[in-house]
Each structure stands twice: as structure tokens, then as C-alpha cells.
Image (cartoon, rainbow, N blue to C red):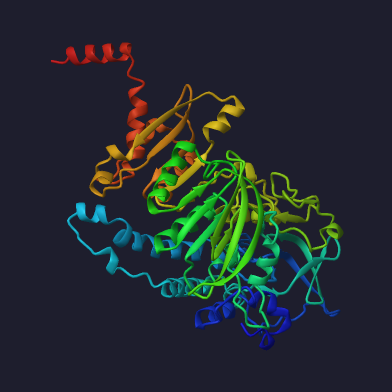
């Protein structure tokens, strides 16, 4: 972007959003309007007073503000960067848009054998991926959805006072933004988090160069986090992904399926380390089948530098050196794009929280109690800045809890929230409740019940037999303690299990829930059947046999 033509106060945003085509221009007009004016002050001294001031307009902040305004509170929301936060701009929305294109490409280009078995023959060499068009669609989808989170909607339709600027606390009851003091009865901090870089010589410098405007018009190295990944317009030849977690795997698989040669680096020897490893292994094997290379035995990352070569796509080539644990040797990779997806930190600095007497930890975030209240009882936290559950839907329901607790003397607890989550690889993984390792650590006895998609009629018809559902159930009753699913559509299926757990419906009762036939979600009901069969002991069978025999 031409930063010289952009208001200096907006350059920190514009330099991270490119290309400045119609889609991105319209996006910024919605979520960071350059000509936005602060609301008129409400007090004679030029300050303003509110029932609730929200800092941060990501998912958690927007839901808090909209919900509070909807019940009659006078609300202000402050955002320095982009309304909509990570989810709209650099997370959930654009990632699912690129995954959609990648899966379509895989169907007709990378999964030819499955097509041929279904009687459909295509020439994979005739299938072309237009990466520029793929990314244009990502920008289009993001812009289309952005009105929902726009300053115009929140101000004009919802009656919320929107400030575009940086918020800092000046006391336990006041916040300053754009030179104005805001007095609040209650405040909510919903500032989210940010991706971190790994320790490696040369990385910080190349990352800074990747987001700078070089006066010599030299090509910028493609060193990315999720915050800049979706700015790409040219397809990399080779991409290295540092990190084998959710973000790293989703985008690695998408890029591989679109035609980039992808290598994933990690240090733990595992992918998706939070998930059951037999389930994570199914995802890993599919990605290997797609062509992704995994090097998960990294001991330390040594250095990264430019090779001096610029590829046909205009991207400078880079060279990275790292040390492997098992081989005790240095490995060097050459590539033209790097995605660092190796962790995130809560965004809690730079707000003068000390003046508000709000305690925080730079790694853990805001220190909140179970009611999401900080050490200043007037101030609450929502979302990634204070929670280990870094999901949009988690922030959403944390916000609902905070509205009740902050404005209506509510007693909602974070610990009462049952939060499911999904990884949108192919196949997907979705989980809710406690994992086996959690139950083992807590000394809780449990039983496991599984049903595999290879035995499900719809999965057989669709040739999507990989994966299974796993229930973790209390040892002596049918209480569902946790559940994980790996397979096609796992993210859509986990909601039914979450409802069962939330309502106290046991696995035995799920056997009585009629599902349409044939559907993959039948594995949920069938797992209930598996559980009920365990109640058919020899004694019970003998009694039932006797009842049948005395019938006339």
C-alpha cells in the first residue's frame, strides 16, 4: 500500500493489509474506516461517561458490547486495529475460505483414484489452480461477512459508541482514547492475542522486512504469521510451516492441496498434541498422502537468511538451518515462504493496566476469577487475553457470562462453560469435555466406547471410512465425561454430543435418539447401542429369556 497517502494513525493497520484492491478497501471501510469520527462527548468537560466500556472489538468484545447495549446499557467499544478481530480478518473466516478451495482442488486433482472408483474420470494434469483467484475469493468472502462486525453497524444499528484508537487506563474508573477520558461503571478487556515468533537468528529481521515498504522496491521475503498469511497473491513453490498445531496443520494441508510443496517442522514429535494421538495420526497420515513432509524432531532452530535468488513468482528464496534431535545433525531447507504458527501470547501490555490495578501475566494473560473478574472488581476479561480456550465461540459465551456478571449481579462461572472445539483439517477432529489423559491425571475411572466410520453405511457410500467416534463415560454409569471424533464432518457432529453433556443426557439415552438413515451422525446413536449392550449381563439375558418363554 502507498503509506504516504494514508493517515499516520492508520498506517499500522494498512501495512498489514494488502493488496489494496476493492475487496480490502471495502474491508477497511467496514472494520477500520479511515475517516471515522469519535462520538460527541457526553460531559461538559469534554469527557464521556458509560455504563460499560469494552476494549477490543474481536468476537468477545463485539458480543459483549452488542449484548449489553441490547439490554439497555450505554456502551462504548474501542478498537485500535480491525473490528472483527482475528476471527474475521486473519483467522476463522479466511482460513475456511481457502480450505474450501483447497478441498475442491484435492477432489479433482489429488483424489483421482477415489473419483475413478466412483466412475468419474478426469485428467488431473488438465486441472489448474489459479492461486490469485483463490486468494481473491478469500478477500471477497471476508469483505462480504465484514459488515456484520462493522463500525457502521455497531454505531448506527446497535447504538454503540465506537472509538477507533488505542485505549489506556488512567485510573481504576477511567480510560483514555484519542485524548478523551471515558468514565466507566464497568469495563471489559477483550484484546485477544497475537502470534509469537520463535528464537532463530535472522527471523525477526526478515519478518520485519516482510511487512515493510522497501524504498528500493526490492521483493519482500514471505515470512508470515496468520496475521499476514492471507495477504499472499502469488503461490509459493515451497513453504515451510513451523508448528504442528491447529493453525499450522490447517494451512499446511490447504497449501499442499493447492499445489505448494509444504514441509511442517515441530519439536514434540507429534501433531495436534492436545488430541488423542491415534486420532491425530489419522490426520497426519492423510496429510502425508497429500504430499506434506513432516520433520517433527527439531532440537533447535539455528538461522534463516536470504539466498539472493528471486524465483519466477517474485518471491525471494530463503534458507533455514536447524538441528535435529535424533540425528544430532544440522538440516538445511530452501524455500520461498515461511509460516510461523508456533504459539500465541495474550495481548495485555501497553494499556497501563497497573493504573487500573488489574493484575496480569504476559504469558497467561489477565488474572481473572471464575466469574471472569480481574483484580479490579469493576473490570472483567473476555476471550484469548484471559483464557486457555482460544476459540471464537468460547469468547462468545464468555461475553454472555460477563454481561450477566457485570451488569446484573450474575453468578455465571467460566468453569460451567462446556466448550467444544474442532480442527478443520481433512479429516476433521472435534472434541468436547475431558480427554483420557485429563481423567487419568484426576484419578477419575472411566470406560471408553467407540464406533468406527468404516462400519457406517453412509461413510461407506461416500467412501469416507477413515476415523471414528470415542466416548469417555463414567465407570459405573452412562454420564458422558468427554468425546472426540475424527472423520468427515466431525465439527458438525460434536454439537449433538455437547448438547447431551450440557443437558445431562447419558450415552445410554442417546441410543434412543432416532437419526435419519443413512447419516454419519448415526455413530452417535450406535455408540449408545454399544454401551447398552454392556448392561446385558448373563443374569440379565437369562431373565429376559425367561420372560420371552412364558409369553403365550
Is residue 390 among the parts visible in the rendering? yes
Residue occupying image coordinates x 52% and y 74%: 147
Q: Nearer the viewer, residue 350 or 43?
A: 350
Query: Could you tell me residue 302's position as x and y percent?
Result: 67, 53
Residue occupying image coordinates x 54% and y 36%: 434
- Residue at the left extreme, as displayed: 552
Q: Nearer the viewer, residue 323 or 27?
A: 323
Query: Could you tell me residue 137's position as x and y percent?
Result: 43, 73
Is residue 512 among the parts visible in the rendering? no
Q: Nearer the viewer, residue 139 or 218?
A: 218
Left or right of 52 on screen, residue 93: left
Q: What is the number of callouts on the image? A: 0
Residue occupying image coordinates x 36% and y 49%: 488
When asked about the image quadrant of residue 115, the answer is bottom left
Say if 263 sits above or below 415 in the image. below
Q: Quadrant location of the N terminus?
A: bottom right
Left or right of 317 on screen, residue 171: right
Q: Quadrant location of the C terminus?
A: top left
Say if 464 sits above or below 529 in the image. below
Residue occupying image coordinates x 33% and y 70%: 128
Query: Could you tell me residue 11's position as x and y percent?
Result: 69, 79
Query: Could you tell me residue 507's position as x and y percent?
Result: 41, 32
Say if 164 sits above or below 307 in the image. below
Say if 419 sits above or below 259 in the image. above
Q: Nearer the viewer, residue 296 or 26?
A: 296
Amino acid at each position: 500500500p502507498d503509506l504516504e497517502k494514508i493517515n499516520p494513525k492508520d498506517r499500522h493497520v494498512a501495512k498489514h493489509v494488502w493488496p489494496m484492491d476493492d475487496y480490502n478497501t471495502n474491508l477497511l471501510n467496514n472494520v477500520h474506516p479511515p475517516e471515522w469520527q469519535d462520538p460527541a462527548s457526553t460531559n461538559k468537560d469534554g469527557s464521556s461517561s458509560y455504563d460499560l466500556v469494552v476494549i477490543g472489538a474481536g468476537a468477545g468484545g463485539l458480543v459483549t458490547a452488542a449484548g449489553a447495549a441490547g439490554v439497555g446499557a450505554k456502551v462504548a467499544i474501542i478498537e485500535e486495529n480491525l473490528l472483527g478481530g482475528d476471527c474475521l480478518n486473519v483467522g476463522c473466516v479466511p482460513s475456511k475460505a481457502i480450505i474450501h478451495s483447497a478441498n475442491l482442488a484435492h477432489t479433482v486433482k489429488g483424489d483421482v483414484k477415489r473419483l475413478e472408483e466412483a466412475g468419474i474420470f478426469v485428467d488431473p494434469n488438465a486441472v489448474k489452480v489459479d492461486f490469485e483467484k483463490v486468494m481473491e475469493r478469500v478477500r471477497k468472502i471476508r469483505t462480504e461477512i465484514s459488515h456484520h462486525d462493522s463500525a457502521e453497524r455497531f454505531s448506527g444499528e446497535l447504538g454503540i459508541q465506537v472509538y477507533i484508537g488505542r485505549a489506556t487506563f488512567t485510573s481504576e474508573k477511567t480510560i483514555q482514547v484519542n485524548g478523551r477520558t471515558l468514565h466507566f461503571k464497568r469495563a471489559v478487556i477483550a484484546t485477544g492475542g497475537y502470534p509469537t515468533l520463535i528464537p532463530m537468528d535472522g527471523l525477526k529481521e526478515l519478518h520485519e522486512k516482510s511487512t515493510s515498504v522497501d524504498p528500493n522496491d526490492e521483493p519482500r521475503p514471505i515470512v508470515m504469521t496468520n496475521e499476514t498469511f492471507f495477504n499472499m497473491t502469488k503461490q509459493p513453490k515451497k513453504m515451510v510451516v513451523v508448528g504442528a498445531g491447529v493453525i499450522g496443520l490447517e494451512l499446511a494441508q490447504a497449501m499442499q492441496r493447492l499445489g505448494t510443496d509444504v514441509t511442517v517442522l515441530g519439536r514434540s514429535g507429534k501433531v495436534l498434541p492436545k488430541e488423542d494421538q491415534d486420532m491425530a495420526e489419522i490426520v497426519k497420515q492423510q496429510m502425508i498422502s497429500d504430499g506434506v513432509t513432516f520433520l517433527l524432531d527439531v532440537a533447535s532452530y539455528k538461522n534463516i537468511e536470504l539466498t539472493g535468488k528471486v524465483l519466477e513468482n517474485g518471491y525471494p528464496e530463503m534458507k533455514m538451518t536447524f538441528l535435529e534431535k535424533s540425528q544430532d545433525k544440522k538440516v538445511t531447507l530452501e524455500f520461498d515462504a515461511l509460516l510461523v504458527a508456533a504459539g500465541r501470547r495474550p495481548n495485555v501490555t501497553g494499556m497501563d493496566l497497573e493504573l487500573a490495578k488489574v493484575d496480569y501475566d504476559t504469558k497467561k494473560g489477565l488474572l481473572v476469577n471464575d466469574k471472569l473478574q480481574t483484580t479490579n472488581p469493576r473490570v472483567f476479561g473476555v476471550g484469548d487475553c484471559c483464557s486457555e480456550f482460544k476459540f471464537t465461540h468460547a469468547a462468545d459465551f464468555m461475553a454472555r457470562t460477563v454481561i450477566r456478571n457485570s451488569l446484573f449481579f450474575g453468578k455465571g462461572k467460566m468453569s460451567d462453560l462446556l466448550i467444544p472445539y474442532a480442527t478443520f483439517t481433512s479429516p476433521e477432529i472435534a472434541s468436547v469435555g475431558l480427554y483420557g489423559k485429563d481423567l487419568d491425571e484426576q484419578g477419575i475411572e472411566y470406560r471408553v466406547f467407540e464406533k468406527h466410520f468404516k462400519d457406517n453405511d453412509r461413510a461407506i457410500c461416500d467412501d469416507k471410512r477413515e476415523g471414528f467416534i470415542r466416548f469417555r463415560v463414567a465407570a459405573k454409569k452412562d454420564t458422558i465425561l468427554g468425546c472426540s471424533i475424527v472423520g468427515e464432518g466431525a465439527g458438525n457432529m460434536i454439537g449433538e454430543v455437547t448438547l447431551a453433556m450440557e443437558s445431562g443426557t447419558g450415552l445410554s439415552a442417546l441410543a434412543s435418539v432416532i437419526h435419519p438413515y443413512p447419516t454419519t451422525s448415526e455413530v452417535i446413536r450406535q455408540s449408545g447401542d454399544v454401551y447398552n449392550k454392556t448392561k446385558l449381563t448373563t443374569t440379565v439375558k437369562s431373565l429376559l429369556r425367561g420372560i420371552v418363554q412364558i409369553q403365550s
